[in-house]
Amino acid sequence: MRILQVCAEIFPLLKTGGLADVAGALPQALQALGAETRVLLPGFAPILAGLAAPREVAHLDPPGAMAQASVRLLHGRLAAVGVDAYVIDAPDYYQRDGGPYADTAQQPYADNHLRFALLGWVAAELAQGLDAAWQPDVVHAHAWHAGLAPAYLQAAATSRPQLPGCVFTVHNLAYQGMFARSAFDELGLPESFFSIHGVEFHGQLNFMKAGLYYADRLTTVSPSYAREIQGPEQGCGLDGLLRARSHELSGILNGVDAAVWNPATDPALAASFSAEDMAGKARCRSALRRELGLAAKADGPLFCVVSRLTEQKGLHLVLQALPELVAGGGQFALLGSGDAALEAAFRTAAAEQPDAIAVRLGYDETFAHRLIAGSDVILVPSLFEPCGLTQLYGLAYGTLPLVRRVGGLADTVADTRLETIDIDATGFVFDEFSLPALQQALARACALHRRPADWKRVRSRAMAQSFGWDRAARAYLGLYRELAPLA
Ligand code: ADP
């Protein structure tokens, strides 16, 4: 079985969030199960730089306004990921100052509809046999960036019915890729596709909706989120379509790449540790306190956050909870970047209490490992959370997750209460998205921390949880087989 994964970022070459972690881990997990997997990516500088032995597959003539760009398709090996890749070399679109989606001033590029329509169009071309040496049996498109892949495939299917099936995965329904109606006219899709039964959403072009409408199977990254997005509260206006397609929608929980996130082998840590020998974790904590200038002698737990700073993540609640957390003897360290007001507020909090609060703004992969390893509790109080990865890293590193009961957080963390402590407790879970509810959960974390034997029991169970990619890859393979039973 040949699978083409289509996505905009991939760990460790280019990452803005959990999507890259998924894109970087799933191909290998599928390959381990015998599914031949290649990825298709835009030719951003770090991706081109990571492509070994590139050969030119074709010069491309994309439709619509994309015809103006010079576009080549390359094939090579992404050694850092361990996967074969097709990379779209279109310097006008992908070689720019700034990030993959927005410029240095964080403004989305004005031609994002063309930049990512090209990704979907090339996916559909590969599905039709563009590379005579390798034609996929299934196309798997990830997030809104790849949302037009199933639309272009559907457009091609009117003349060629025997085309590969398509799976579309929602990584975060809040990011939909919406553009003015005029953008649609530049894409070369059939006029009839701009319809409520197609890519139109309230008069606009919507890439996410294209994926949800035209793909053969829909998935998202946790069972709870799959349910939640079918309701008006979290459906972002697309819940009606998702309800209509509920029989083709499933939730497949993301995994943890144990080659990257394993405290026994992690080269970023001051000391390694495992559930059998936790001495290294204490050394990691001391080293982290030193590195951050936090008071070395502290009785309470060290809480951490590793996150994009956005409304979604509930961090304004954490800010409000900091005074009580510190008054109770706790310490707090954050690594994050994003919203300017949140960045400034956390910076101020750290400046006021440098012994107890440390804040590092920016993106730092290795520090994220040290921070999670050295902390006692990782906070993920999200308003919504499709899957969430940092709570899984917390479990693996014996850093108990404190999470809101929503999306993938609800599916992966079990609350610690008297009646669960000997059964399934792995962290702290609260329900209402409010300061008092968060504070109660923090108080419970502190109370457990004062009972070292109980703390260790919960921590051992947390570390024994298994969220490998193998399980997710098997579930995806099951879907692919439905679409390509003979492959
Ligand atoms: P999302 O995709 O919504 O950002 P996830 O929890 O699914 O949230 O994935 C976030 C990923 O990005 C994790 O691998 C996390 O460790 C990483 N991450 C987030 N912020 C930072 C940062 N400032 N520095 C390093 N890694 C970060």
Image: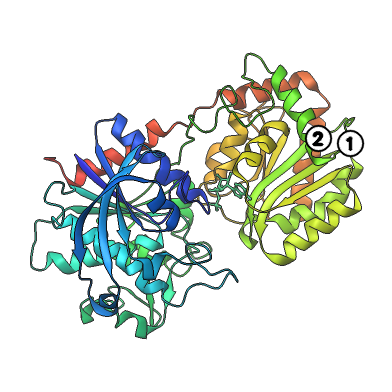
Disc 2: which residue: 289
Label ID, residue 19: none
Q: Which corner quadrant holds the N terminus? A: top left
Name the one closer to the observer, 21 or 41. Answer: 41
Give the crowd class for mark 2: few <14, some 14-19, many >=20 residues within 10 Å. many
Q: Report if residue 197 is visible in the image.
A: yes
Is the C-beta separation of discs 2 and 1 under 8 Å?
yes
Name the one closer to the observer, 86 or 297. Answer: 86
Q: Which three-letter amino acid code belongs to the residue tagged 2?
A: Arg
Q: Which three-letter amino acid code belongs to the residue tagged 1?
A: Ala
Give percent across and percent down for residue 173: 46, 61
Name the one closer to the observer, 31 or 213. Answer: 31
Compared with residue 330, is residue 130 higher up or lower down, i.e. above or below? below
Callout count = 2
Give percent across and percent down for residue 420: 65, 27
Compared with residue 332, is residue 208 higher up or lower down, i.e. above or below? below
Label ID, residue 295: 1
Q: Quadrant of residue 365?
A: top right
Please report the residue visible at 75 percent of the width from the left and 42 percent of the height from the top: 441
- Answer with left or right where residue 454 lies relative to residue 107: right
